[in-house]
Image (spheres, rainbow, N blue to C red):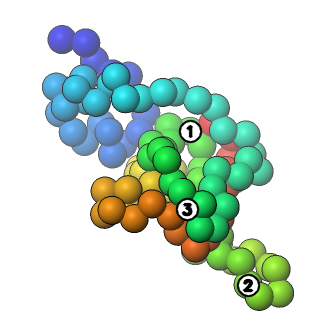
Amino acid sequence: MYQVPTANRLLLSISTSARARLAPHFERLVLERGQVIYEPETPIAYAYFPETALISVVALTREGAEVEVSMTGREGVFGAELTLGTDSIPMRAMCQGRG
């Protein structure tokens, strides 16, 4: 059986057969440090399973300052809201570490 290579710990926690079934939906890409993935209230179209990148979710204050509220690395997923029927978040998601 084809094994989907990954360094993402969440994907590694599921069975090889489950990863193989999901494989046609995966696309590997490189995120650059500072790259904005989503702006507040814009539709989330994809889930990201970082392997080496760090994805930061920041809230914007009324004054325009950014406050980091979460960070996702190779242990998780960004975009899990899609599984809950939500297609946007009121925060910005951006890459804090290239990968």
Instruction: Using the image as rendered, state which of residue 88 and residue 21 is in the foreground.
Output: 88
Q: Is residue 81 above or below residue 59?
A: above
Q: Is residue 11 left or right of residue 99?
A: left
> Residue at the location (52% across, 27% down)?
28
Q: Dot 3 surroundings within 10 Å: few (below 14), some, or many (20 or more)?
A: some
Q: Secondary structure at mark 2?
A: loop
Q: Dot 2 surroundings within 10 Å: few (below 14), some, or many (20 or more)?
A: few
Which residue extends farthest right?
A: 63
From mark 3 to mark 1, how far is it between C-alphas? Answer: 13 Å
Mark 1 or 2: in front is 2
Q: Which residue is mark 2?
A: 61
Which residue extends farthest bottom?
A: 62
Q: Quadrant of residue 57?
A: bottom right
Q: What's under tag 1, amino acid-wise?
A: Thr
Q: Secondary structure at mark 1?
A: loop
From mark 1 to mark 2, how far is it between C-alphas? Answer: 29 Å
- Residue 97 spot, x, y in % from top left: 68, 47
- Residue 73 spot, x, y in % from top left: 51, 50
Q: Earlier in the sequence, mark 2 or mark 3?
A: 2
Q: Which residue is mark 1?
A: 52
> Residue at the location (18% across, 11% down)?
1
- Residue 5 spot, x, y in % from top left: 38, 22
Badge 2 vs badge 3, beta-carbon distance below 8 Å? no
Q: Earlier in the sequence, mark 3 or mark 1?
A: 1
Q: Which residue is mark 3?
A: 71
Q: Is residue 7 above or below residue 40?
A: above
Q: Earlier in the sequence, mark 1 or mark 2?
A: 1
Q: Is residue 76 above or below residue 57?
A: above
Q: Secondary structure at mark 3?
A: strand
From mark 2 to mark 3, how far is it between C-alphas? Answer: 18 Å
Q: What's under tag 3, amino acid-wise?
A: Met
